[in-house]
Amino acid sequence: MNNTKQTVIIAFALFSLFFGAGNLILPPYLGVQAGSDWYLVAFGFSLTAVVIPILGIYAYAKLQGTMFDFGKKVSPVFSYIYCMFMYAIAIALPAPRTASVTHEMAIAPFFNSPALLTSCIYFALVFLFVMNRSQLLSLIGKYLTPLIVVILLIIIGLGINGGSSEMATTAVSSPFSLITFGVFEGYQTFDAIAGVVVGAVIVLSLKRYGVGSFQEKRKLILHSGLLAGFGLFIIYAGLIVCGYLWQDNFSDNATRTEVLTKLSQITLGEIGASFLSVLVALACFTTAVGVITGASDYVSGLFQDSRKAYTLTAILSSLIGVLVGSYNVAFIIDVALPALMFIYPITIVLILLHVMPEKFASETVFKAVILVTFIFSIPDFLKFLIPIDHLEGVLSVIPLANHSLGWVLPAIIVFIIVNVYQKKSLNNDIKEA
């Protein structure tokens, strides 16, 4: 297989593994809410739903190890805890949510069947794909993703050509608030987590393609990641613009799911619901397969690549998916919020440190920056567990804490301080020598 064809197939696979339930229902809603300032939320959303996930894949292109290696520079203990927490979140929340979204948008409108039945059939099929993972990239890249892209481009093309919204204003108070609104909606895609979880899947799958050398894999993943990121941005921006252009057709309290459903009906007419149901089912399904494959790979690696461990993890993950996936989407999103506010800052910082040149990302830098990020992300996590009044004193003294970004400046400051200190120490050692 030539390099261009490999790059396109891997790019399609990356696009599909990232593009799940949240990626479908969030962008149009952002456009409706932002009004004429849609480009601000598009920028914020792209940071956490495109840039950070693709950087996560690039980090794996440099690292070319397992997920355990991703956090090892902090400490082995931290890495074990981080990996288990990440996979637990991935298995318990975004993977089951794909089944719930599939039921609410693709099954319930046409069939009077219980969500539990949908969830059972859905994860039975997911399990079959996970157990035949040697075909994962080719099946996703060659067949499923192109169909998803075609349906989306039809909706976006018709939506932009036919939309005529007036220059409506948004209820959000400031440009920065709009950007952060987009950033946190990007959290709901789980794509930074997906970047860390499926990065190892891509590296392992490349070996089955016969790509052996370190440099070949790094170059192929980098080119595929850039292509996938560009595709994601085009789709997201297009859906956000469509939401803005057709915002007059939605009520003030329209949900994310309702916005996407009506947008498809407006653009595609009578067959809109059918197109949308296919789109949702395919996008959600490929995400669930990628998540459970990654979790099974990790557990298998802990037991010397045991096939039995891989199979048992896939079975357990599918059973959890059946159970949690039988609940409605709103419930799963509410449960996910505290976990996202806690794990996302740590994940973002790990990704950024791994893509930096080695001289700026020593083990000491990893330890210090991750510790500070962990400490200053605690208030964001606690907001969902205790009354906000109890945190006012803390939030008032931490810059950006009221925007749930209190960890950003402390992490940057510590990164700079530790690097300056290490550079001075190195210069002093050289002088003494």
Image: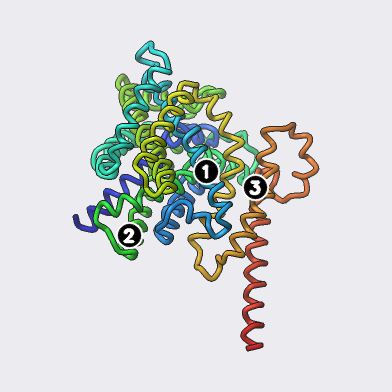
Q: What percent of the width, then of the height, locates residue 155?
A: 34, 32
Left or right relative to 48: residue 314: left
Residue kind at label 1, given as amino acid type: Met
Residue kind at label 2, given as amino acid type: Lys
The colour style of the image is rainbow
- Residue 62 in which image quadrant: bottom left
Residue at numbered disc 2: 217
Q: Which mark is residue 405?
A: 3
Lower sequence index among marks 2 and 1:
1
The residue drawn where x is 43% and y is 53% is 66
Is any atom of residue 158 visible in this view? no
The residue drawn where x is 19% and y is 55% is 1
Is any atom of residue 353 visible in this view? yes
- Residue 393 in which image quadrant: top right
Q: What percent of the width, then of the height, locates residue 84?
A: 52, 43
Q: Residues within 10 Å of mark 2 (few under 14, many from 20)?
A: some
